[in-house]
Image (cartoon, helix red, strand yellow):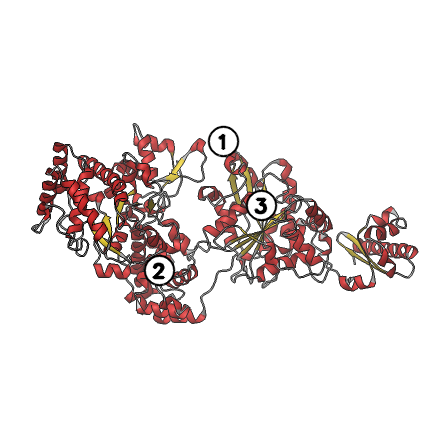
Amino acid sequence: MSERTEAMSEAEDDVTEAVAQAVQSALPGADVNVVPDAGGFVVRVVSEHFASLPEADRRARFQEHMTPRIASQVHTWELLTESEAAWYGDLTTAVTPPPAWATALDRVEGEKATSAQITFASDLDQDLDSAPVVTFYSLKGGVGRSTALVAVARRLTSEHGLRVLCIDMDLEAPGLDTLFGISQDSQSDLGVVTALLAYEFGEDPSILDHVVPVDDNGRLFCMPAGRIDSTYAARLRSLEPEIWYRERVNSLHRLIDDTRDSTLRPDVVLIDSRTGVSPVAAPLLFDVSDMAVVCFHPHSQARNGTELLTGALLNSTTRRQAPLPLTPEPRFVVSPMPPGQSAPRLADRAKSWIDNWLEPFNDARHGAPVLTAEEITHVVSYNAEVSFSDTVTSDSIRLAPYARIADWVLQIVPEPAPKRGLQNKTSESKAAALAQLTFSTGTAEELDGEQFLQDYVVTRQVSETADPETPLILGRKGTGKTALFRWLAAGKLPGWTPVCVTTPSFRDRPDWSFGPENYDAIDQHLAMSGQDWGTFWQILIALAVHRTEDAADNAGAPHPAMQNLEPGDFAATQAVLNVLQDPMGALRCVDWLRKVDANGKNQLLLLFDGLDTAFGNTPVQRRRRSHAIAGLLAKQADLASKFSRVRLKIFVRQDIWSSLRFENKSHFYGLSRRLQWEDKREYFKVVLKRAVHAPAFQDILRTADPSLVETDVASWTPEQVDMAWSSLVGERMRGERTAFTSNWVWNRLADGNGDHSPRSLLQLFAAALDWEREEEKRSTYDRSVMRPRGLALSLERVSEPALSALLDEEFQELRAVADALKDYGRTPIGEDALRAALGITPEDLITLAREAGLITLNNETDDAARAFRVPDLYRWALGVTRRGPM
């Protein structure tokens, strides 16, 4: 025994004897137990004399018998009756010293570095056996610690699909509920403080009663500290962190373990710690956390304290022993980084400090990667909107600066392994599945009708946009407008007879679905006669209803010019022109439609699609298209009030709609829907519907979950979609452990506005399938039918057609922007550089490029030095790299 240890032991004996003598003087015959721990001494006195005394009087009886020197070393008195002592449990002298600041910092100051092996959770080949705990901590306030936690939580749920529980352990100044926007759900008698007290009192609280869901997706939850009021303050005063490690049941451990074992089943637990050297922060950092995210600003005041904290973390081992003692893994967030030229200098200063703090501990890594500031430090720039906002929302731009922190957390989140039976079935059936799988990449116009209906999946979005009471459907090129049109035109909407008034360029398009030459002839007549496009549409609708089988119920022809028409679009165009020449022609057509509406047996759904290409693509033809579509929409507003069983459904490209100017355009603000894929699982059903046609893949799904084969893809739950997706292409990108394949595909196939095209999804899987067939000849893989790496290697084959569709079919005027991006060769590109590349008057082109999704504002720059990022969907085709601005 060293001299220092021997001296400490003698001092403890002196205090123990002095306390026992003082207690016996005050209360002869009492049972006295004195236990030393890291915070001083715990004294338990058991006597029936306490039965009639309140707590304050029990303490007062001993204070007069304690010398100041002795009293200062007793941090906890337990003055109990015999029945109370039994309720408290044994107070053993074999107490493991609790994790405390004094102990942790003493180790650092005494040794400077540990000789033991430092192993982190992220060093292990195997996954952790339960949800990791990540504590967000800062020595001083005002550095965005809580904001970072909330942003990471939201990103883990929205971008990575994890179930996250956030615990507010900043008990003296709680605020997570406010940042999440759920403060109205907080109650003073529910939350962390109340739950911990219940454990201290030997109760068994229902932990989920203290948890509040943050949103409706069932993945993000918060355990608030509790609403601050007089009762909360009283509960907080009653809380005694010092006794957690002396009781048979550790309240903090129970709190975390019960949340893990509950039906909540979080994938990760994020804890917001109190700042400074508070009693609660020590066990959070040095005992329960698998990772500690330390937030600080690189001011000299923070340097010494953060250095000591780093040493304390790296000298600690957590309660988790799997398969060997683990060290809490430090990560550093330098925040807030002020804007301006000083930012790089401050960031370099912080990283230099951290490298110096880490250097003494690298010898203890024993073959593991050395610790470097570059790998475990992230800088968050100051953002006034975030700093002064009451809540942290799921806005992707605001969450983007915290993406790297979320990736750190993902490194230690367990990755689900496929069931052995499923993996065996995948291995057994993979060859046949690869041979049978097909992913049609043609447009909706090109696909065979029977094949199209077999492959089309009626998602929730389809059901909503197909509503006959919604006359206007908007969408970008490739988002599925024509596919929805074909489904409706096939009569798949129960109770409605479809009438195709205008159609895309189908092989069997009706005679009255005109092309550029037809519309040119009609436009010339309208110009000479002074008639408008609305009049034309009345006539064309009547002709389409008249010529569609089972639509008019033998009501005769709307006008004599429409009787006994010869086949072909010439005869149809001539009939329309003849009716236009009749002053009463258009009125007769409307009157005829009213009679069909009143007397017919069927509800009619009038469908208009193909308007974007039907008029041609010259400047004159595009202007004609705008006038014609504006006239159609104005006529819809007029006709809607005249019919009870006839509805118009008009499909218009989003950019065309935005450019239209006509009276009462606001009429459609509540009567339109934008066809866009906002739910990635609904989006993935498009490719999964194709995959389930393969019998061998059905066998794999049947092993995973028989209901996947028994039910239609459209009705699959999100969990079923995830299961089928993982069986097809795996859950996580290989070599990118922090990226789920679903998120990778969703993010890579998004344009700058976050829009997604089913066509691009099918093209990606078709290319990845070709790659997998060749790769399987070289090396086998049985975790899924297609290996995730194939997706990454196939993105280039999707990028070129996506850019072509954007520039050739929608926004020819953006070729100058595309050429400028190609010449620059990097992303992001600074606004000044883009302006210079475009030459004169670039403002309209830059605005249009952003509206079209060719570029988007870079998340990592502020408004003072804006830059634009090229989304991955177009990056390959443009030949730009991610090396940043020059």
Amino acid type indicated by mark 3 = Ser
Q: Quadrant of the N terminus?
A: bottom right
Q: In 3D space, how far apart are the residues under numbered discs 3 and 1 (Cα atoms)?
A: 39 Å
Percent of width and height locating residue 284: 64, 52
Q: Are marks 2 and 3 in contact (CB under 8 Å)?
A: no
N-terminal of the pair, mark 3 or mark 1, is 3
Residue at label 3?
Answer: 183
52 or 743, nearer to the observer: 52
553 or 329, nearer to the observer: 553
Asked whether, in this view, residue 94 is left or right of residue 672, the answer is right
Q: Quadrant of the C terminus?
A: top left
Point out which mark residue 341 bears.
1
In what element is the residue under mark 1?
loop
- Residue 820 seen from this side: no
Amino acid type indicated by mark 1 = Gln
Q: Is residue 639 above or below residue 213?
A: above
Amino acid type indicated by mark 2 = Ala
Q: In 3D space, how far apart are the residues under numbered discs 1 and 2 (Cα atoms)?
A: 53 Å
At 45% across and 42% down in the image, what residue appears? 397
In what element is the residue under mark 2?
helix
Residue at label 2?
Answer: 714
701 or 535, nearer to the observer: 535
